[in-house]
Image (cartoon, rainbow, N blue to C red):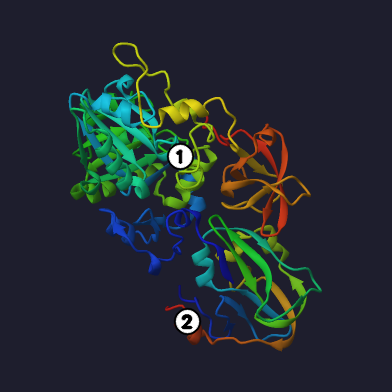
Amino acid sequence: MSDAFPENLRYTAEHEWIDDASPATVGITANAAEALGDIVYLELPEVGAQLTAGDVFGEIESTKSVSELYAPVTGTVVEINQDAVDSPETVGSDPYGAGWLVKVDVTETGPTLSAEEYQASIGA
Amino acid sequence: MSEQTPDPTAAQTDGAPTTDAAAEGRRSPLHDEHVALGATLTNFGGWQMPLRYESDLAEHRAVRAAAGLFDLSHMGEIEVSGPQAAAALDYALVGNLSAVGVGRARYTMICADDGSVLDDLVVYRPAPESFSVVANAGNAERVLAELRDRVEGFDATVVDHSASTALIAVQGPRAAEIVVGLTAPEAADVVRDMKYYSGTFVEVAGVGTFVARTGYTGEDGFELFVPAEVAPEVWRTVLEAGRPLGLVPAGLSARDSLRLEAGMPLYGNELDETVTPYAAGLGRVVKLDKVADDGSPLDFVGRAALEARRHSAPARVLVGLKGLGRRPARSGHDVVLPGKDAPIGHVTSGAPSPTLGCPIAMAYVTPELSAEGTELAVDVRGRQEPFVVVPLRFYTRPQD
């Protein structure tokens, strides 16, 4: 996968990505999507929900397993990707594009990794 | 993101994660084929086996619509042969194996003295004095040891062929077309006309093969027992011949969702040493009426315990659950009455059903809440999801 770890994004050790826009968009990495397999269920917080960096903000479930989603930053959810909730397979097929999860008004950043550091952390 | 529930097929062995890096264990004779096909490997029953090649869902759907090719070489193949092979198995297993016709197969179980299930098995009888016992990978060594122990005193021999045997399954509505097409012309009719749960020796793809019309997917299909050293060639030949008909290689993930839809138990989930065949709704495999030549009841391991349990209600019984919401229940989740906290059962297998489009599960629940239509709930990570009791077989293939 050539675009497995876009350089313009920051990453968490728990396999989320976040961009530097305002509000910031959050998703899961291609590596995580690949490991999950076919994604069948996605649960996201409501617009207005408060996220805390490092805390669980949703869950993502594939045919074989379920994982919790961890907030890379602290802030307020200003938009959720309802299309991805309705068609969770989008998260697997286009994790950095149509498969984004939430947009967050960031009040405080959390610990993140560069693309290179993230790759190193997963042994890619 | 962190994984909360490891893949259940892995969890039943040692909970090992499912990534390539963590896959350890014995390698199938088809290992290189799987790697070449880009499979994600998982540890299952002490073996490194393909979890999926590309997509669980696509593989599942291919088996329902066309055909899937599975490597089952992790299963144990144990031969019991000799003049008293049938009698020995009548004693060792709960079924009536001496009543199995030559060329036929039987689903049966090996139980402990207390009636608990040590493994569920398919036993083939390729010749009058030869039986092939196919055991689950994780139980194969135990079954082998038990069989060796139990046939003592009978004129019968136990030989483990697991290491030298590869098992390749072709499953799905196009399976017969694919396998028949690879059979020598004079044997094509034999294979085409094979009954379900029968097996015979024929050449497939030029290799002497024990072909059985058995499977674990709810579809028509064949299982090919071939010598390990020629297995890669057979695998490639079948795959090449079947591709134009929609055959795809399919992993354990699809196998698990297929068997769940078909209502078939998985040892380690629905069956283990804490349940009897009766609790699992499989009392029919226990043949308490099997008799010796002189008409006296035939003793077998577990008989006394099973006879005593036959009419007493088990504490929990196995049911099918169909989800009314979208969140699937998973193995280990508590079953409750809607709005209540006290568990009245537990989920043994659960997944989103690709065919039905809703969550399905198998669960042990108290008998008084096991009636079809009973509204229950499953505690899915702290939040209740509504489920209703349905017959265990969620999917029945269309008959032609």
Q: For label 1, count other residues whose C-alpha is less than 10 Å away and answer few (under 14), some (14-19) or many (20+).
A: many
Q: Position of residue A114 (x, y in %)?
A: 54, 87
Residue B331 in view (yes/no): yes
Check the image and report above or below for A55 versus B330. below
Q: Chain of mark 1?
A: B
Find numbered disc 2 in the image and state the secondary structure of the residue it sits on: helix
Residue type, mark 1 in image = Thr
Q: Position of residue B382 (x, y in %)?
A: 70, 59
Check the image and report above or below for B148 versus B327. above
Q: Chain of mark 2?
A: A
Residue type, mark 2 in image = Ser
Q: Which residue is mark 2?
A: A121
Check the image and report above or below for A54 versus B136. below
**Distance between mark 1 and mark 2 Cα atoms:** 38 Å
Whether labels 1 and 2 belong to a single chain: the reply is no
Q: What residue sits 49% from the left and 40% below the top?
A: B265
Check the image and report above or below for B178 versus B268. above
Q: Which residue is mark 1?
A: B217
Furthest residue to the top? B294
Q: Residue B385 vs residue A37: left or right?
A: right
Q: Position of residue B368 (x, y in %)?
A: 69, 33
The one nearer the camera, B119 or B254, is B119
The circle drawn on residue B152 is: none
Numbered disc total = 2
Q: Quadrant of residue B54?
A: bottom left
Find numbered disc 1 in the image and state the secondary structure of the residue it sits on: loop
